[in-house]
Image (tube, rainbow, N blue to C red):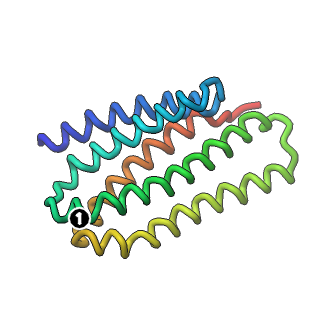
């Protein structure tokens, strides 16, 4: 029960921070320094969420965290691409050509394919660091966080012209 409460509190904080970051990134009203500070806050909160829920031994942690940090960098690149795509769509959805829409669909599908390829590429690295049961737990935590991020990104997508 205590772990569920911890997850809920950290997920709520992460949601608020993500909402702010995505909103600011899409509106492009914040400077690069502020965005970097907010990204670091997300990384810190996310790492805390993972740490609380993974219950790693010291030996596991020593091997897991470097892999995690590299993986998070690649995930951040995917998030940046997603935010840029949503920003492009938001700016042009009213006067978008079919060619532009086709390019955006291709970009979206490429981001999703890259996300899946990343999961698959890192699986052996995570399995080298942790037992399968903990790797699966970690992937489920990532899935929950990704759902929160997707929800916040979706809020920035205009639906009417």
Task: Give the camera-side residue of 4 and 129.
Answer: 129
Task: Give the camera-side residue of 112 and 130.
Answer: 130
Q: State the residue at coordinates (45%, 66%).
A: 119
| Image position, residue 118 (x, y; %) | 49, 66
Give the secondary structure at mark 1. Answer: helix
| Image position, residue 21 (x, y; %) | 51, 32
| In the image, residue 84 above or below residue 59 | above
| In the image, residue 26 above or below residue 121 | above
Q: State the residue at coordinates (57%, 64%).
A: 114
Image side of residue 155 versus residue 121, left or right: right
| In the image, residue 98 above or below residue 26 | below
Instruction: Quarter of the image for the C terminus: give it.
Output: top right
Q: Residues within 10 Å of mark 1 (few under 14, many from 20)?
A: some
Number of disc labels: 1
Q: State the residue at coordinates (58%, 60%).
A: 112
Image side of residue 61 versus residue 126, left or right: left
| Image position, residue 137 (x, y; %) | 27, 60
Task: Give the camera-side residue of 1 and 49.
Answer: 49
Instruction: Quarter of the image for the N terminus: give it.
Output: top left
Q: State the residue at coordinates (24%, 49%).
A: 51
Q: Quadrant of residue 109?
A: bottom right
Q: Which residue is mark 1?
A: 134
Image side of residue 121 versus residue 137, left or right: right
| Image position, residue 108 (x, y; %) | 66, 55
């Amino acid at each position: 029960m205590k772990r569920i409460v911890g997850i809920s509190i950290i997920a709520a904080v992460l949601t608020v921070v993500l909402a702010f970051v995505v909103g600011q990134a899409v509106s492009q009203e914040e400077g690069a320094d502020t965005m970097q500070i907010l990204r670091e806050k997300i990384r810190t909160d996310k790492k805390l969420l993972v740490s609380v829920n993974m219950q790693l031994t010291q030996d596991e942690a020593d091997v897991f965290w470097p892999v995690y940090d590299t993986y998070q960098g690649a995930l951040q690149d995917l998030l940046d691409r997603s935010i840029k795509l949503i920003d492009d769509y938001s700016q042009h959805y009213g006067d978008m050509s079919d060619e532009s829409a086709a390019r955006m669909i291709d970009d979206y599908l490429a981001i999703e394919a890259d996300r899946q390829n990343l999961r698959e590429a890192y699986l052996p690295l995570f399995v080298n660091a942790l037992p399968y049961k903990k790797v699966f737990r970690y992937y489920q935590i990532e899935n929950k966080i990704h759902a929160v991020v997707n929800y916040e990104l979706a809020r920035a997508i205009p639906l009417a012209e």
